[in-house]
Image (cartoon, rainbow, N blue to C red):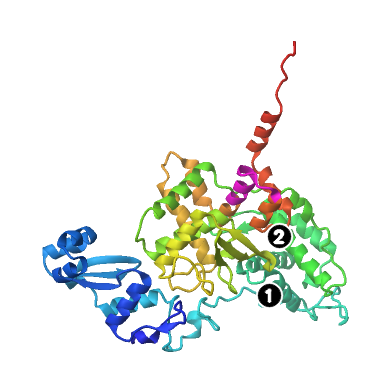
Amino acid sequence: MSPADWIDMLAVPPRPLPAGIDDAVRYLSDALNVPVYERWTPASLLRKYGCMQDARAEQPEVFALLLAGGPVVQFWHAGQVLTVPAGRAPRSEVVLERLLRVLRVRFRCVTPRAPQREHEHGAGSGPHTRARAQPSLDDEPWLAGAGPLVNRDAASNTLGSLDDASAIRLFLRDRAGASVHTRRGYIAEIRRLVSWCQAHDIAGPLSGLSREHLVRYRDDLSTMVARTPRASQVLGERSQKRALAVVRSVLSYLWRTGYLTANPGAGLGDTAAAREKFAPDRILPAGAVHACDSWLRARLNLDGQPIAVMRRAAIVATYRFTGIRLDELAWHDGYPRVVTGDDGWTLQVRGKGRRERAIPLPAPCVIFLQRYRSACGLPPTPTPRENLPLIRGQRHDALGPSGLYREVRAAFAEMAAAVPPAEATTRLALQEASPHWLRHLVGKTLVVDAHVPLPVAQVLLGHQSVATTAGYARADASQLRHVMQRCFTLTSDAG
């Protein structure tokens, strides 16, 4: 394959690489500002630096290997520039092709590839994202058909559906949007309800359930068992509330859109009251926060790190300093994207309900993103016309929610391994932590530590209700104690 088959997509306008290997190497070295492949001899070193003393100061590794005898080659490999004797170096065309394939976010190959089997990437896979099978309820026969509550009047049934399966499919489309994580959560709770109904010989479908059925389901939730890869345990209070919230949400949607003539789930648990009581308990303790920041600093102070190291650090830093949800960092329809201006970087995300919000990025987060972009062969600062995934996987397509989750969990495992055995509480917190713990940490930092006004914190965190944001104040009893101690003291005697 010729280098001319590759297009530099960040050039204005995009242009093909030079056809010759040496010319393409020079082009990439200039574009990336790193030596892609360079062969050194004493003569070339002297030509470049004028005298051997300057050459030794600028290229100590090259100078030392030349003294040992034979030419020396510097070449790019896995985000680093390696210096080896020429006899151990790969050929320049091998290095060139490897670099182009690793950085194919920027450099696009125009030579058509052989068609791949559908099971390898899935139908409809785009240039940035491998197609992922959307979780669905199409294989659930219990939902087929329509119950007595279905509205068969075409004038008022705005969904246009006459069976539960198609109506719920529209609910998932409208409520879950592009979030695979949210969609999977909805489906899991609907399947929980279906399993309960089947265990109690309730024929269904959903539109055939009475309020009595739903009340029994609500009461039985406290005795249900949740099975995880680690163990089986009774549903906690939080899980029970989530299960009821999904059932209420489905029935409310079907009623408000005219598919149902009545809503048997109305008032089945008070959503507003639950929101008023929200108090996050999955917040990293101070020792774990220190371990997290130490882990980030260690990666910031090391130059020439492989792409995988900088990617993991960029992911953790983005969650650590923005508080975005797990799905909000996954690429979809042009989001998330970074906008730069004179006042700094701003991260634009699309969250729950497809609501968009803008989060000004603090300097530490910007530094990690810049380092990661440079490791990927991109300019440190995004261009206004750039439309590329913010975080990419090992195959250089967009990293999805499950990949982002694995990266953060792997980072927490590395942090925990570095914690001294005596600090058991810190180690345990890091072993249990997930990306959402970092979101709660940002919420606590804004509301409790920095005393940011609740409406401002609500906008940054993307909460629908300010009551949810206020939950972070309830999560820290030490602040309440400090307020009471500061405000109330015994008055001294006047006389």
- Image quarter of residue 143: bottom right
Residue plotted at (30% across, 81% down): 23
Q: Which mark is residue 408?
A: none
Residue 134 location (% of width, % of height): 61, 75
User: Does residue 103 appear anywhere in the picture?
Assistant: yes
Residue with the mark numbered 1: 140
Q: Which quadrant of the rendered structure holds the N terminus?
A: bottom left
Is 127 left, or right, of 325 in this rendering? left
Q: Where is residue 24 in the image (x, y as percent from the top left)?
A: 32, 80
Residue bounds of the magenta highlight: 441-454
Identity of the residue furthest to the top in this view: 495
Judging from the image, what secondary structure is the residue with disc 1 in? loop
Q: Residue beneath label 2, please?
A: 243
Residue 25, horizontal then vertical, whole percent: 30, 77
Q: Is residue 145 magenta?
A: no
| Residue 288 coordinates in the image, percent (x, y) | 50, 45
